[in-house]
Image: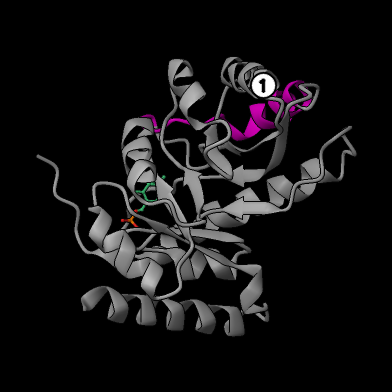
Amino acid sequence: MYIKDNLASVENNISAACIRSGRNRDEVTLIAVSKTKPVEMIRECIDCGITVFGENKAQELRDKQAVITDELHWNFIGHLQRNKVKYLVENVDLIHSVDSYKLALAINEEAKKKNVICNILIEVNVAQEESKFGVTVDATEDLIKEIAKLENVRIKGLMTIAPYVDNPEDNRPHFAKLRKLLVDINSKNIDNIDMNVLSMGMTGDYEVAIEEGATMVRVGTGIFGERYYS
Ligand SMILES: *Cc1c(COP(=O)(O)O)cnc(C)c1O
């Protein structure tokens, strides 16, 4: 039963962070990041009332969706190759990890084929870590201007994966920077661009992220426990 307890404590932490920063709890969506975790654990979450899940592999997402047919909100949070786009459009609510025009174009083509609009976030490498995917802060506005012209893709906001740190306070400046970037770009009044999603904060730092304006936090370990990769 530990998932239930973990969820209760994450929920407490989210509420407390909202209160500290004068925000309403309903401004923040908790995404349960279920990657590598079995279907039974996802079911436990669903039994606790969770409906929003995050996965980072197209194949794993497909396999899980094949057996979990509940009405859920799936989010794709992993690095995405263009040849996998066809598995995601229509099957996810939101793709968090778009960091190139080429990828956005592939999503747009697939969405057009299926006659749907695909919601995406632009992944920004705010901390400028060499190992990370994501567009640089400086290149974000130009990328958004280009993608904004694609008819079957809608940019809902920005996402970042902050560095792994011992002290979550170390990531506060990165979260603040992503928020400022969103506000700055919105103020440019680019056609088709009115972003309101900030996907930032993971198990180690989601409370700080909420204090800095996160509207989506992606929590895996804090709900499901450590991941084991074979
Ligand atoms: C795995 C992952 C998470 C969850 O990480 P935890 O530290 O386990 O909460 C969040 N976001 C992305 C993009 C991930 O790949």
Q: Quadrant of residue 48?
A: bottom left
Horizontally, residue 217 falls left or right of residue 189, namely left
Q: Please give the name of the residue rendered at 66% of the width and 18% of the height, measured from the top-left corner.
A: 113
As drawn, 24 above or below 119: below
Coordinates of residue 153 in the picture (x, y in percent): 71, 29
**What is the span of residues highlighted in magenta in the rendered image?**
130-147
Horizontally, residue 105 falls left or right of residue 191, namely left
Magenta segment: does it hold 55? no
The kind of secondary structure element at disc 1 is: helix
The residue lying toward the viewer, choosing from 67 and 121, is 67
Quarter of the image with the N terminus is bottom left
As drawn, 184 above or below 130: below
Residue 221 visible (yes or no): no
Q: Quadrant of residue 70?
A: bottom left
Magenta segment: does it hold 144? yes
Q: Please give the name of the residue rendered at 67% of the width and 77% of the height, measured from the top-left corner.
A: 23
Prevailing secondary structure of the magenta residues:
helix
Q: What residue is disc 1 on?
A: 108
Coordinates of residue 105 in the picture (x, y in percent): 64, 16
Quarter of the image with the C terminus is top left
Residue 183 visible (yes or no): yes
Coordinates of residue 128 in the picture (x, y in percent): 47, 35
Q: Please give the name of the residue rendered at 66% of the width and 69% of the height, measured from the top-left corner.
A: 27
